[in-house]
Amino acid sequence: QMAKRSSGAGVAIEHDSRDNIFTPNRGWIGAFEATFYSPEIGSSNTFQAYRAHVFDYHQLSRDWILGLRVDGRLARGDVPFYMLPFIDMRGIPAARFQEANIAVLETEVRYNLDERWAVVGFLGTGRAWGNRISFDDADKPVSGGLGFRYLIARRLGLYAGIDVAINPRQGTAEEIVRFAHDPRTQQVAMLEGDRFEVLDITTSPSSEYVGL
């Protein structure tokens, strides 16, 4: 569905016991959010969006911190396609897995090397199902990676850093497709949960595909 305008009003309930809002070591934050879109408040379509999530942090020792994430989202009604929830996780392209229902599980471990530097490792998975695909048939993408952190504001406990994520399934699928099609294939993009492929190929000037 296409909507010219999406205007909604919502409510949210939140609990936050984290010891730091930027880089927590202990505590948890959880929230439930509901947003209602209706022509009465200016929306072109009538639909609802919901989200419930928990981020939980445990200090296993002085230098080891474990983080856990559980995240669920759903949409109901006459939902525009661009407002459908999607798996939002490091290593998974935005809107790659998009459906009426979304569930994400993710964990992260941080190790403090010294007073300024830290390294992190993370692993997660998700599932998208609902209108076009059932829960049992839905893809279960997995992504993980490593990163580093540097404490740039000691008083605030604010770290900055970079994460590098790897999606083994995506990389393997693209290599298989590239090999199966032709070695001249330069790039492969998998869309809509691997239902469609976009190929970037090299052709000769006399190819029948030139100018299409």
Image: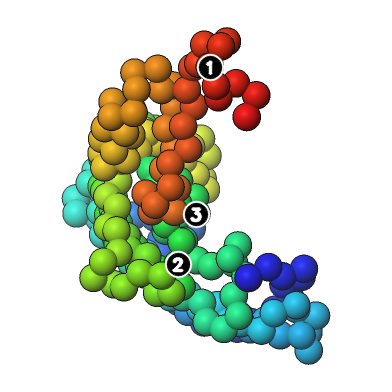
User: Does dot 2 land on a helix, a strand or a loop?
Assistant: loop
Please, what is the three-letter code of the amino acid marked with disc 1?
A: Ser
The residue positioned farthest toward the top in the image shown: 205
Q: Secondary structure at mark 1?
A: loop
Report the disc number at residue 207. Answer: 1
Tell me if residue 51 can be seen: yes
Tell me, yes or no, whether the two marked residues, 3 and 2, touch with CB atoms within 8 Å. Answer: no
Badge 1 crowding class, 10 Å Cα cut-off, few under 14, some 14 to 19, many 20 or more, is few
> Which secondary structure lies at badge 3?
loop
Mark 3 surroundings: few (<14), some (14-19) or many (≥20) residues within 10 A: some
Which quadrant is home to the N terminus? bottom right
User: Along the polypeptide, which appears first: circle 2 or circle 1?
Assistant: 2
Identify the residue under disc 2.
Answer: 99
Q: Estimate the spatial distance between the alpha carbons at disc 3 and disc 2, rounded to whole Å.
A: 9 Å
Q: Nearer the viewer, residue 152 or 34?
A: 34
The front one of 128 and 149 is: 128
Which kind of residue does numbered mark 2 sit on? Glu
The colour scheme applied to this rendered structure is rainbow
Q: Residue at x 49, y 17 (%)?
A: 202
| Residue 134 placement (x, y as % from top left) | 31, 73
Find residue 31 and report its horizontal and vertical position in percent.
Answer: 46, 75
Task: Give the residue type at disc 3.
Answer: Ala
Asked if residue 191 lies left or right of residue 2, the reply is left
Q: Which residue is mark 3?
A: 95
Where residue 172 appears, as percent x and y from the top left, is 26, 35
